[in-house]
Image: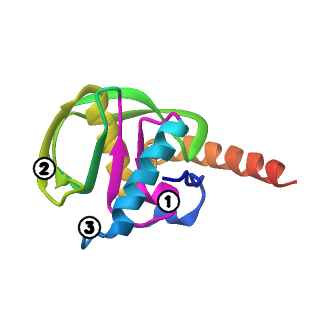
Amino acid sequence: MALIEVLRFPHQILRQQCEPVAAITDDVLKLIDDMVETMYSYKGVGLAAPQVGVAQNIIVLDVGQGLVSLINPEISLGEGTASKEEGCLCLPDLLVTVERRERIQIKGIDRKGNPVTLEADGLLARALQHEIDHLNGTLIIDKLSKLKRDLIIKRLRKQQLKAQK
Ligand code: NI
């Protein structure tokens, strides 16, 4: 296994629509293993493949209830709404209050190629929705008003320019 660099906003791959995984090859399994190791090393609760530069529908999560890795995940049911602060490894030092479904059902494929259906609520439901957003090129800053988003993007650009000097 190996650590992979987590890309930061505004890397363009974070804005891409990811592609479904067509076949579970050794490369896909290695990517999942590396994503898991990277997620734990960054102390994240979840990671989506585009965050490590691969525009494919793969997510891994661990919100403290065990490791979940899903290929081609799709939300099949959603109920209720809940708002809570979220962070993202692609946007360090930023917390955004995001309204999401409170309970969801998710369908996907596990690493052996078996179809799985998952019921989730609380933090797991939130993290799953956050990671699936990544597969559609959506980030937590998109949940802000345009005014706030523009301000934050300006601030991030400034920080990046400083870091490059
Ligand atoms: Ni994220």
Residue type marked 2: Val
Q: Which mark is residue 1?
A: none
Residue 137 seen from this side:
no
Q: Mark 1: few, some, or many residues within 10 Å (few <14, many ≥20)?
A: many
First reached walking from the N terminus: tag 3 or tag 2: 3
Residue at 58% from the left image edge and 44% from the top image edge:
91
**Image position, residue 22 (x, y; %):** 25, 73
Q: Is residue 140 left or right of residue 102?
A: right
Q: Nearer the viewer, residue 33 or 118?
A: 33
Q: What is the x, y in percent for residue 95?
A: 53, 32
CA gap between label 3 and label 1 equals 23 Å
Q: Which tag, 1 or 2, sits closer to the chain's start?
A: 1
Tell which tag, 3 or 2, sits nearer the viewer. Answer: 3
For the residue labelled by badge 2, is the local secondary structure a helix, a strand or a loop?
A: strand
Query: Which of label 3 and label 1 is nearer to you?
Result: 3
Please name the residue that numbered disc 2 is placed on. 116
Q: Earlier in the sequence, mark 3 or mark 1?
A: 1
Name the residue at 53% across, 53% down: 2
Q: Are marks 1 and 2 in contact (CB under 8 Å)?
A: no
Give the magenta part as a residue range: 43-63
Q: Amino acid at mark 3?
A: Ile
Give the amino acid type for the residue marked by disc 1 in the picture: Leu
Can residue 120 be seen?
Answer: yes
Q: Which residue is mark 3?
A: 24
